Image (cartoon, helix red, strand yellow):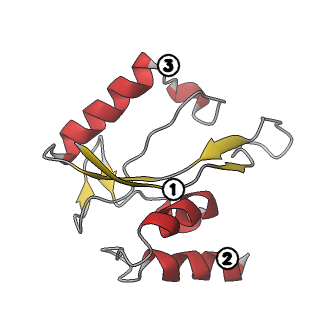
């Protein structure tokens, strides 16, 4: 695996399951990799890193604070929907905290479903809020 690019880290408000729930802000960023791993192999690697850093996934508390959360946002122009992995990430186009750092490292990368660049998607979401 080779790290091709890393965005700056930026603090964002936490997503919560209820409006009255308070959580500390978190740091977010994006990394572009080159890998020979399959999408499932890359997911296994991400989950292993999370476990090594002490993350325990609790399906009953999906939005609970956590030390680390690694997501596969895009994988070339692959479209994949399995019980364990969806690529592109299903929330990618709805989240400024994902699109901003991704646009810093891969502004011209195309979204294989929406057929727009990351920069265009970021502009759309920022103009609608």
**Residue for badge 1:** 7
Q: Is mark 2 on a helix, strand or loop?
A: helix
* Label at residue 126: 2
First in sequence, mark 2 or 3: give its number: 3
Answer above or below: position of 122 versus 104.
below
Where residue 34 is drawn, which disc sits there? Answer: none
Figure quadrant of the N terminus: top left
CA gap between label 2 and label 1 equals 19 Å
- Circle 2: is it few (<14), some (14-19), or many (20+) Cα within 10 Å? some
Closer to us: mark 2 or mark 1? 1
Q: Residue 22, image x and y in percent?
A: 83, 36
**The residue positioned farthest toward the right in the image shown:** 20
Report the quarter where the C terminus lies.
bottom right
Name the residue at 29% across, 38% down. 43
Q: Measuring 35% from the left and 61% from the top, which residue is drawn there?
A: 88
The tag earlier along the polypeptide, 2 or 1, is: 1
Residue corresponding to mark 3: 56
In the image, what residue occupies the spot 59% across and 82% down? 124
- Along the polypeptide, which appears first: circle 3 or circle 1? 1
Q: In which quarter of the image is residue 60?
A: top right
Residues marked 2 and 3 touching at CB (< 8 Å): no
Q: How far apart are marks 2 and 3 (CA)?
A: 33 Å
Crowd rating for badge 3 (residues with CA inside 10 Å; few <14, some 14–19, many 20+): few
Q: Is 83 placed above or below 107 here? A: above
Tell me the CA gap for discs 3 and 1.
26 Å
- Dots 3, 1 in contact, CB < 8 A: no
Q: Which of marks 2 and 3 is in front?
A: 2
Instruction: Please state the horizontal and vertical placement of residue 93, each as a whole percent of the image.
Output: 51, 68
- Work out whether 62 lies above or below 118: above
Disc 2 and disc 1 in contact, CB within 8 angstroms: no
């Amino acid at each position: 695996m080779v790290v091709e690019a890393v965005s700056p880290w930026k603090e964002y408000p936490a997503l919560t399951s209820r409006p009255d729930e308070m959580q500390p802000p978190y740091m977010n960023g994006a990394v572009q990799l080159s890998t020979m791993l399959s999408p499932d192999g890359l997911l296994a690697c991400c989950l292993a890193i999370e476990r090594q850093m002490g993350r325990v996934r609790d399906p009953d508390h999906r939005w609970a604070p956590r030390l680390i959360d690694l997501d596969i946002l895009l994988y070339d122009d692959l479209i994949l929907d399995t019980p364990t992995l969806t690529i592109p990430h299903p929330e990618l186009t709805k989240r400024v905290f994902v699109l901003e750092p991704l646009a810093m490292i891969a502004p011209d990368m195309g979204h294989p479903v929406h057929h727009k660049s990351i920069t265009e998607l970021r502009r759309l979401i920022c103009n609608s809020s």
